[in-house]
Image: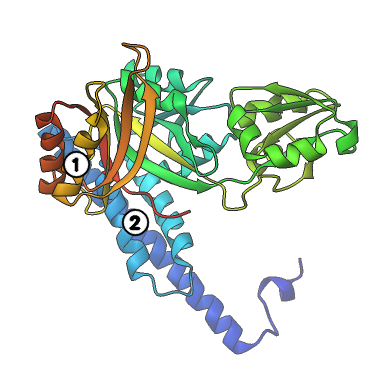
Amino acid sequence: MSGKDSDHSGEDPRQAELRAEIDRLDQEIQALINRRAAQVLEVARLKEANGRPFYRPEREAQILERVAERNQGPFPAADMVRIFREIMSTCLALERRLRVAYLGPEASFTHAAVHVHFGQAVEEVPVATIGEVFRAVDAAKADYGVVPIENSTEGAVNATLDALRQSALQICGEVAMRVEHHLMSHAESLAAVHRLYLHPQTRAQCLEWLTRHMAGAEWVEVPSNAEAARRAANQPTAAGVAGSAAAEHYGLPILSAGIEDDPENTTRFVVVGKEAAGPSGHDKTSVLVSGPNQPGSLLRMLEPFSEAGVNLTKIVSRPAPEALWDYVFFLDLEGHCTDVAVSQALEGVRAKGGAVKVLGCYPRASSP
């Protein structure tokens, strides 16, 4: 490189002035980030002395909400939130790096949800099934777990609902992510694909496209999208359906992009842990309710929410394991379980003979 290139001689004086200002701002930003980190370490010492948990999801949700609210551009608010998410993740790792279990392998959509919620500065623990995520947190092999719970096209993920019913873990966060599915393979064309690996939920979300274009291939179900890509990467006439991160991670060309039947296809993930989240001001509560198998039983259990002015956002039924044709109901509602209205509604359900298990109270996810 010539001296002329290195010292930018001949450039517009205003451009040189702007470069100098950017350098000065970079130095100031770096100093402020380190000052923030020093404050975080001081808070960590106080938490340790008082026996307080060092990770508080409601506090992080409040910080990120304020970041979005005060942003005035030209940076988009979502990008500004993403930057602060990583600053917070790295600062938290100075205290202790969180271990997060998730439905793997690497490059799955759940893996991406880990980064959206916790940032990059975590110790990732990929496992093969949703049940293993819960067991890893229960056994203290991970601090938190991330699992899918519902899809806007296909509804609830039953394996997660069943695990929540059986587990003592609490939902302490959620992530809503737009999901794009791509068909990827080393094969030269769709016609050259003889075997197709895909997750059952993915199959349902892409069924119309797959029926039109891949009817001649053998369809093989696998436990995750990333596993579909991993298997396809080792077979020249096989394909997998997964996200772009999996295609990049496993070196697979994308033969057809965006094959989901609904372009607004969104998956919701939940974060589970051993400690409940405190109120953030914009919360959601998930509960499991059950009652006697009698006429009007469900209506009686839902009436207290209406009477207390609590808005239900979801109701899903699942077979109860105790008796044939008995059901339990998973409810999502607006508010935190410590809110007066929510507390009154839950007590009202119990007063009418219903059993209630609070699955978690947690900050609501922002729209994808």
For the point 30% across and 37% down, the residue is: 331
Whole-percent x, y for residue 266 in the image: 52, 46
Q: Which residue is mark 1?
A: 303
Task: Determine whether the residue tagged by mark 1 lies in a helix, strand or loop.
Answer: helix
In the displayed structure, would residue 147 be above or below residue 65?
above
Q: Is residue 97 visible?
A: no
Q: Quadrant of residue 330?
A: top left
Q: Which residue is at 68% across, 37% downward?
A: 207
Q: Which amino acid, mark 1? A: Glu
Residue 89 or 310: which is nearer the viewer?
310
Give the vertical position of 188 relative to 224 (above or below).
Answer: below
Q: Quadrant of the rendered structure where residue 108 is? A: top right
Residue holding disc 2 = 64
Amino acid on which disc 2 is placed: Leu
Indicate the position of residue 34 as horizontal and vertical percent values. Answer: 34, 54
Percent position (x, y) of residue 165? 32, 22
- Looking at the rendered image, the quarter that the N terminus falls into is bottom right
As displayed, is residue 294 above or below residue 269? above
Residue 235 in the image, given as x and y percentages of width and height: 81, 23
